[in-house]
């Protein structure tokens, strides 16, 4: 039996209790799934007639693919802009100037507190009343800006907490080597913080992708709106929404897989840069008659001797 300092291995009775709980949970979930399936089947939602429209290419070109394009465009624009906004305000919240920290903190807190849907509706009406954007771009502009403001404020807090979690000695050592604050932030602290906070950033990207469906309320043509239009046209609203849900789950899964691989690549590349120095690659320090050619341990000036 393996034991850990932080975790007590369960005994025979505890393991039996966990198995019983697992079996009960599986039975409850299976019963709920069967109840939902039986209810939908009684309403005729799984007949071939309800699902036949999804085999027609014209249905995909008219409804689902345009809706998917609208969702991806809004999500991609808002994620990119939110990352930029979050980086800027995350760094500003760590400024040495108190006024800058207070202003950045006020903006971030207010942006996080406003519900995304309310902000989206407010921006849509504001843009429409003042003719800020062309009429065919009003809904997209409101969706992208609202998602950018909210997700950017969340990412700012993620970046700030990531930078503050790094050892303080790194920035102190960089300053001691003569690097400026901007160089320390951009070259040392921010890359490490992004790598460490990448799982949280991925989660926020998924949130931005899902929240793009709120554009349904301001007539933005994303996949949920097009799915409801398809359901009304083909008299199959439940199958249409099930297909939309499967598409959204697939996109979120692919986004998570891609981001996870990027995270692993960044961590692997970071470890790969820590190779030992080749013998003879270090120049002798001034005033020292270092014999680099006799060096036997890579990266260590083991045979360096003071000059006579």
Image (cartoon, rainbow, N blue to C red):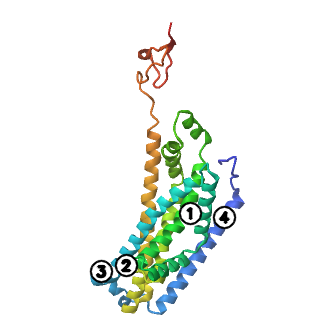
Q: Does label 2 or label 3 sit earlier along the sequence?
A: 3
Nearer the camera: disc 1 or disc 4: 1
Toward the top, the furthest residue is: 308
Q: Which mark is residue 13?
A: none
Nearer the camera: disc 1 or disc 3: 1
Q: Vertical placement of 144 versus 185: above or below? A: below
* Total numbered labels: 4
Name the residue located 52 percent from the left edge and 34 percent from the top edge: 178
Q: Label 2: which residue?
A: 134
Residue neighbourhood size for the residue with mark 4, other residues' Cα within 10 Å, grouped as few (<14), some (14–19), many (≥20)? few
CB atoms of marks 1 and 3 within 8 Å:
no
Residue neighbourhood size for the residue with mark 2, other residues' Cα within 10 Å, grouped as few (<14), some (14–19), many (≥20)? few
Q: Vertical placement of 47 versus 83: above or below? A: below
Q: Label 3: which residue?
A: 61
Residue neighbourhood size for the residue with mark 1, other residues' Cα within 10 Å, grouped as few (<14), some (14–19), many (≥20)? many
Q: Secondary structure at mark 4?
A: helix
Nearer the camera: disc 2 or disc 3: 2
Is residue 98 or residue 205 the one in the foreground? 98
Q: Can the viewer see residue 139?
A: yes
- Cα–Cα gap, marks 2 and 4: 60 Å
Q: Secondary structure at mark 2?
A: loop
Name the residue located 62 percent from the left edge and 50 percent from the top edge: 97
CB atoms of marks 2 and 4 within 8 Å:
no
Q: At which x and y percent is residue 220?
A: 42, 80
Q: At which x and y percent is residue 34?
A: 53, 82
Q: At which x and y percent is residue 105?
A: 62, 60
Nearer the camera: disc 2 or disc 4: 2
- Cα–Cα gap, marks 3 and 4: 49 Å
Q: Does label 3 or label 4 sit earlier along the sequence?
A: 4
Nearer the camera: disc 3 or disc 4: 3
Q: Label 4: which residue?
A: 18
- Cα–Cα gap, marks 1 and 4: 37 Å
């Amino acid at each position: 039996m393996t034991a850990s300092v932080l975790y007590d291995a369960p005994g025979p009775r505890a393991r039996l209790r966990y198995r019983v709980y697992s079996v009960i949970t599986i039975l409850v979930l299976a019963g709920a799934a069967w109840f939902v399936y039986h209810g939908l089947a009684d309403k005729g939602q799984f007949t071939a007639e309800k699902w036949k429209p999804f085999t027609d290419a014209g249905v995909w070109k008219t409804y689902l693919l345009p809706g998917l394009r609208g969702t991806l465009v809004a999500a991609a624009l808002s994620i990119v802009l939110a990352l930029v906004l979050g980086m800027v305000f995350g760094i500003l919240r760590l400024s040495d100037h108190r006024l800058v920290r207070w202003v950045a903190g006020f903006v971030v807190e207010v942006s996080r507190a406003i519900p995304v849907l309310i902000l989206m509706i407010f921006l849509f009406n504001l843009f429409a009343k003042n003719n800020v954007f062309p009429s065919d771009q009003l809904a997209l502009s409101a969706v992208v800006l609202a998602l950018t403001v909210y997700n950017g404020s969340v990412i700012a807090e993620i970046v700030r907490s990531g930078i503050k979690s790094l050892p303080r000695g790194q920035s102190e050592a960089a300053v001691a080597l003569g690097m400026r604050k901007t160089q320390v932030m951009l070259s040392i602290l921010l890359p490490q913080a992004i790598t460490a906070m990448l799982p949280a950033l991925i989660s926020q990207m998924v949130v931005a992708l899902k929240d793009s469906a709120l554009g349904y309320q301001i007539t933005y043509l994303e996949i949920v709106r097009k799915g409801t239009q398809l359901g009304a046209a083909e008299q199959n609203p439940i199958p249409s929404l099930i297909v939309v849900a499967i598409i959204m789950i697939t996109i979120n899964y692919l986004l998570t897989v891609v981001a996870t691989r990027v995270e692993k690549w960044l961590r692997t590349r970071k470890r790969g840069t820590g190779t030992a120095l080749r013998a003879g690659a270090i120049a002798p320090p001034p005033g020292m008659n270092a014999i680099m050619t006799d060096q036997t341990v890579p990266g260590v000036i083991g045979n360096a001797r003071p000059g006579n």
